[in-house]
Image (tube, rainbow, N blue to C red):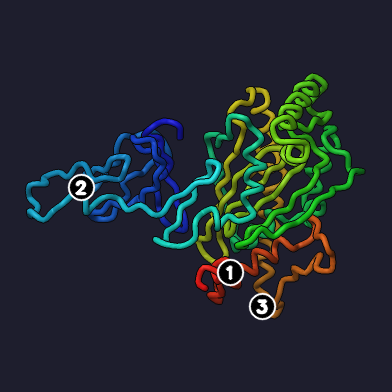
């Protein structure tokens, strides 16, 4: 959304919204509801527009949400004021280009809400000197399962080998994976229900971890990229940016998988046993056409709706949902790693972080930060 008028229409928490860069350069979120009769004022998913016009009675709103056109306006009373009918705008803030919307008029800042998750967003964004961008086009699919199962699945390191055997065998056969290498890493709770698993993968990363599957010609180029990262950020941050992968949850339903490629995934429940999923590829703005093709191939091959991993995960989560019909089985176990001082990616600390925050919200129990603000 680089140009004034660029917009994306989305549904967030069941609400239709328009994310738009207004003519003044500011990024706004407009509620996609005409203030006359409530019809949608934007009925396309993306594009560039100077204004949004309701198809019902042709009320027209500019990119700032202001009402600028009313057919037959002289028929209204003298008390009619266009300013009273601007499109509603919820609270909006951004971090490193990620735009967040808050439908409550007051509350904590985005920075406070993100808490420890900011560090891991930084690791994603520092992969490019000029910034990251969402590649046009989205993956849209659904699952007949409760949405919280996909939260667990998205950073569940325990299921990787048994569930995705086909993919790992494919990597071994193509030379992209050495199954004799172990997967060192950690699981962390980041506050406010956010959590992450971070690990050193045995596969390659174009950001600066060469793998034989890339070919010898890419080796020097990738080493140059790593040297630049090290010079800019220091050895430890450069190592984490380039040679660690991460599966990050921003509570409650934003997943950023920084694997061979970076995937943004979000999902919303339609009913207790059915969800709709959207996913996008996030790539460096300054990468070559060759590197982008490699990244997108990895994005589709592993996490695409028809790839190696996603159909496996859909099958497993739908299987869980079917199994839940036996209500005599009261609980799911997420205790793995509780006796370990430093939990690893195949443990379940990250899931416990999500469920503890979920429990707090259901019971109206404040977080530490909320309690301190109230004191």
Q: Secondary structure at mark 1?
A: loop
Q: Earlier in the sequence, mark 1 or mark 2?
A: 2
Mark 2 neighbour class, 10 Å CA radius: few under 14, some 14 to 19, many 20 or more: few
The image shows residue 372, relative to residue 139, as above or below, that is below
Please, what secondary structure does the residue beneath circle 3 have? loop
Q: CA distance from mark 3 to mark 1?
A: 31 Å
The residues bearing labels 1 and 2 have C-alpha atoms spaced at a distance of 46 Å
Residue under label 2: 57
- Is 18 positioned to the left or the right of 269 in the image? left
Of discs 2 and 3, which sits in the foreground?
Answer: 2
**Residue 308 in picture, x, y percent from top left:** 72, 43
- The local secondary structure at tag 2 comes to loop
* Mark 1–mark 2 CB contact (< 8 Å): no
Residue 5 image point, x, y percent: 36, 34
**Label 3: few (<14), some (14–19) or many (≥20) C-alpha neighbours in 10 Å:** few
The residue singled out by tag 1 in the image is 367
The numbered dot on residue 327 is 3
In the rendered image, which quarter is residue 69 located in? top left
Q: Nearer the viewer, residue 261 or 278?
A: 261
Q: Residue furthest front?
A: 375
Question: Between disc 2 and disc 3, whose residue precedes?
Answer: 2
- The reply, left or right, for residue 262 in relation to residue 268 is right
Above or below 92: residue 130: above
- Viewer-proximal residue among 206 and 144: 206
**Left or right side of 317 for 36:** left
Report x, y in % for residue 159.
77, 56
Residue sitting at x 7%, y 50%: 75
The image quadrant that residue 84 belongs to is bottom left
Residue at 49% from the left image edge and 60% from the top image edge: 108
Q: What residue is at 73 percent from the left and 29 percent from the top?
A: 231
The correct choice, above or below, for 340 with respect to 120 in the image is below
Q: Earlier in the sequence, mark 3 or mark 1?
A: 3
């Amino acid at each position: 959304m680089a140009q004034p008028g660029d917009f994306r229409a989305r549904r967030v928490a069941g609400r239709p919204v328009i994310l738009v860069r207004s003519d003044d350069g500011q990024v706004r979120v407009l509620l996609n509801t005409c203030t006359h009769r409530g019809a949608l004022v934007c009925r396309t998913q993306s594009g560039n527009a100077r204004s949004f016009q309701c198809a019902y009675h042709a009320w027209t709103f500019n990119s700032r949400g202001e009402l600028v056109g009313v057919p037959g306006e002289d028929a209204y009373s003298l008390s009619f004021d266009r300013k009273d009918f601007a499109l509603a705008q919820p609270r909006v803030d951004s971090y490193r280009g990620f735009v967040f919307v808050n439908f409550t008029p007051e509350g904590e800042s985005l920075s406070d809400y993100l808490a420890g998750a900011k560090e891991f967003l930084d690791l994603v964004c520092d992969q490019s000197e000029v910034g990251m961008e969402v590649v046009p086009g989205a993956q849209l699919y659904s699952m007949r399962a409760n949405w919280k199962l996909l939260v667990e699945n998205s950073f569940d390191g325990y299921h990787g080998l048994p569930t995705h055997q086909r993919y790992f065998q494919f990597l071994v056969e193509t030379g992209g994976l050495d199954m004799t290498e172990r997967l060192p890493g950690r699981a962390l709770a980041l506050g406010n229900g956010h959590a992450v698993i971070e690990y050193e993968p045995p596969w390659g990363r174009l950001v600066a971890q060469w793998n034989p599957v890339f070919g010898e010609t890419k080796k020097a180029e990738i080493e140059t990229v790593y040297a630049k990262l090290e010079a800019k950020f220091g050895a430890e941050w450069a190592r984490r940016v380039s040679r660690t992968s991460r599966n990050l949850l921003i509570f409650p339903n934003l997943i950023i998988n920084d694997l061979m490629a970076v995937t943004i995934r979000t999902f919303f429940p339609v009913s207790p046993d059915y969800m709709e999923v959207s996913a996008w590829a996030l790539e460096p703005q300054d990468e070559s056409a060759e590197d982008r093709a490699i990244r997108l191939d990895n994005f589709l091959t592993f996490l695409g709706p028809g790839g190696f991993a996603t159909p496996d995960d859909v099958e497993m989560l739908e299987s869980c949902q079917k199994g839940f019909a036996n209500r005599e089985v009261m609980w799911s176990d997420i205790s793995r790693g509780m006796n370990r001082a430093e939990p690893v990616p195949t443990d379940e600390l990250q899931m416990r972080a999500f469920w503890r925050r979920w429990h707090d919200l259901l019971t109206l129990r404040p977080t530490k930060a909320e309690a301190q603000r109230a004191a």
